[in-house]
Image: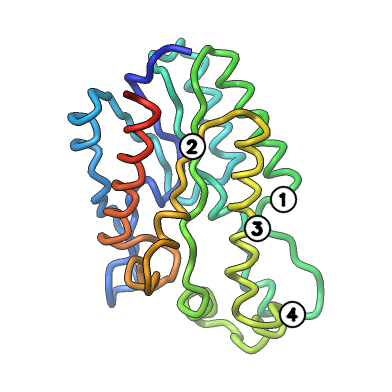
Amino acid sequence: MNLIRKIEVFGDSILKGVQLKPGSGRYCVDNNIDVGMLSRKFSLNIVNRSKFGCTVSKGKELLSRFLEGKPDCSAVLMNYGGNDCDFNWKDISDNPHIKHEPHTPLKEFIKTYKGIFRQVYDKGIRPVVANLPPIEPQRFLEWVSRGLNKENILTWLDGVNTIYRFQEFYSRAIEDLARASGVMLVDLRGAFLKETRIGRFLCEDGIHPNTEGQKLITQELARFCATAVT
């Protein structure tokens, strides 16, 4: 593999820099992940192709089209899972006593990510994967249950912390997959968990990093670049 000099970023709203505007209930791109600083400090060219709402399957489609065009890059950084492990909360609210699957079941999630790694390796490009920043479960529950039956959702969850544990399960799957595949990992989750009062780094929805959270992401990306790029 060549020395990393150009990184293409494929992810969802986390790396796109989407935030929930306080008090508005609306999402907007307010990206304070300091790509400019990273580019200057580590002599990198970073192109961000992240898409709001992207799952790993949609990411695979986007990346496949990108790889068809003889891409000029040395690494691809991917960050999926937040939308994959989410649920149709209206269906849960309406029917709390039946089984519900996440948007991407775990086996499919792992299989798809493995396929992406192979595609990237086959092009002589280095895959890099990021795990998931933690969520604040009570905030997240309040957000997804707006206009729905929150008690029914809690009945199905059997406790608000189930939300946290399930999202953590997908993040750990990403870490395990990276180790098994020899893929470099950017530990975004660890960067947040080192801090006290994690909620102060997240928006009102409990899942999207706010400006301070995006600064933590920048710091972790800088730590990664310091070891992987130089």
* Residue placed under numbered mark 3 in the picture: 169
Which residue occupies 47% across, 55% down?
189
How many C-alpha atoms fall within 10 Å of the one at disc 4: few (<14), some, or many (≥20)? Answer: some
The quarter of the picture where the C terminus appears is top left
Does residue 197 appear to the left or right of 100 in the view shown?
left
Name the element at disc 3: helix
Name the element at disc 2: strand
Does residue 100 appear to the left or right of 134 in the view shown?
right
How many C-alpha atoms fall within 10 Å of the one at disc 1: few (<14), some, or many (≥20)? Answer: some
Q: Disc 2 versus disc 3: distance between alpha carbons?
A: 18 Å
Does residue 55 appear to the left or right of 7 in the view shown?
right
Front residue of 54/206: it is 206
- Horizontal and vertical percent for residue 108? 73, 43
- Horizontal and vertical percent for residue 162? 65, 73
Label located before the other in sequence (4 or 3): 4
Which residue occupies 35% across, 46% down?
220
* Residue placed under numbered mark 2 in the picture: 78
Name the element at disc 4: loop
Q: Nearer the viewer, mark 2 or mark 4?
A: 2
Give the amino acid at mark 2: Met
Front residue of 142/183: it is 183
**Residue 106 - label:** 1
Image quarter for residue 207? bottom left
Give the amino acid at mark 3: Phe
* Above or below: residue 132 compared with residue 181: below
Image quarter for residue 34? top left
Q: Are marks 2 and 3 in contact (CB under 8 Å)?
A: no
Give the amino acid at mark 4: Pro
* Residue placed under numbered mark 4 in the picture: 96
Which residue occupies 64% across, 22% down?
118
- Horizontal and vertical percent for residue 39? 23, 30
